[in-house]
Image: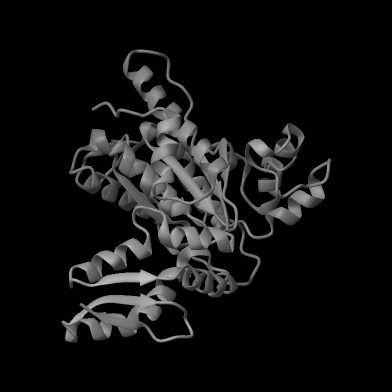
Amino acid sequence: MAIQTARPSAIVAYLDQYVIGQEEAKRVLAVAVYLHYRKLALARGGAASMDKSNVLIIGPSGCGKTLLCETLARLLQVPFVTADATSLAQTRFVGEEIEAIMERLVEKAGGQTDLAGQGIVFIDEVDKLKASSDGQPRLVSGESVQHALLKIMEGAPVRLEDGRVVDTSGILFLCGGAFVGLEQIMARTHSFGYIGTAQGEDASLLDRINSRVKPTDLFEFGLIPEFTGRLPVLARLRELSKEMLVRIMVEPRQALYRQFREILAQEGVELKIAPAVFQQIADIAYEYKTGARSLRGIFEEVLNPVLFAVPDRPEVRQVVIRSLFEPPEFRAA
């Protein structure tokens, strides 16, 4: 089964509907996905096999790494699974865990191993796969997990418990992590002095080269050269600003504001929230330092009095929230 891949520009346009900002990372991922499935098409046509371009995604917690990967898979209509590198390091038998990942991928592919072999696997928290220096006991070292992942990331058959085989040579592996402390390494090792804000078309060529993570930076951080070599493409996501947090609540197709407007619309009630409220929520979420992860909890806490009262008040047709410091206004028809 051949996967139809859109042009990189169309992929970015689709991502823009669901993910706010991160333009540079979107372009990197769009091109990587486009090339990956083009290479698979050429290989099926008899061309010489080409090396895979798996992707390393670096960005702080809550900046959208998983969302980007999920959205890409949804656009491509390919099976997609996520795995936690920390869990791999805490298991006794890494090989069995890798087999379990492939089992889940086959399930997402409806039992079709050939389709599973063209899917996407996102392995999060790979920055935790290094020798433990915090004194915490582990059943398997992070370096051992890196070695265990090498073959499937490059392309190798994985035999499942029922005897079926998944060929991983066509699976795109996306690995993510926050890599806390990497910027300090870069500041020390980059010859021109690290410029952390350089990104996109607004940055000069020197700035973009200078702000790029080098393989030696990753070696010093704790990734082995062989593992780093299986991740030749690098996408960097930036910390979310307060303005981006506001946009996340109102602009994407699955935005929180849209979701709760639809929920209350089922009760025949219109929800109106003043712009100042979104800014206040963003201020709180920014202080939590967890990116967009805390937005839903804060948002639901704000709407809790509304969602509690509306089902018992059929006369209400509109709810207006003007500030976090004022009670909601319930308006009858």
Tell me residue 218's x, y (percent): 66, 47
- Left or right of 58, for residue 105: left
Scheme of colours in the image: one colour
x 25%, y 33%: residue: 114
- Left or right of 306, for residue 288: right
x 17%, y 82%: residue: 315
- Left or right of 313, for residue 191: right
* Quadrant position of the N terminus in the picture: top left
Q: Is residue 152 visible?
A: no
Residue 67 position (above or below residue 266): above
Q: Is residue 10 visible?
A: yes
Residue 89 position (above or below residue 315): above
x 31%, y 35%: residue: 117
Tell me residue 282's x, y (percent): 52, 69
Tell me residue 192's x, y (percent): 83, 41
Tell me residue 319's x, y (percent): 31, 77
x 53%, y 68%: residue: 290
Q: How many marks?
A: 0
In front: 56, or 224?
56
Residue 162 position (above or below residue 60): above
* Residue 135 sits in quarter: bottom right
In front: 292, or 311?
311
* Quadrant position of the C terminus in the picture: bottom left
Residue 45 position (above or below residue 299): above
* Residue 168 sits in quarter: top left
> Residue lying farthest top?
46
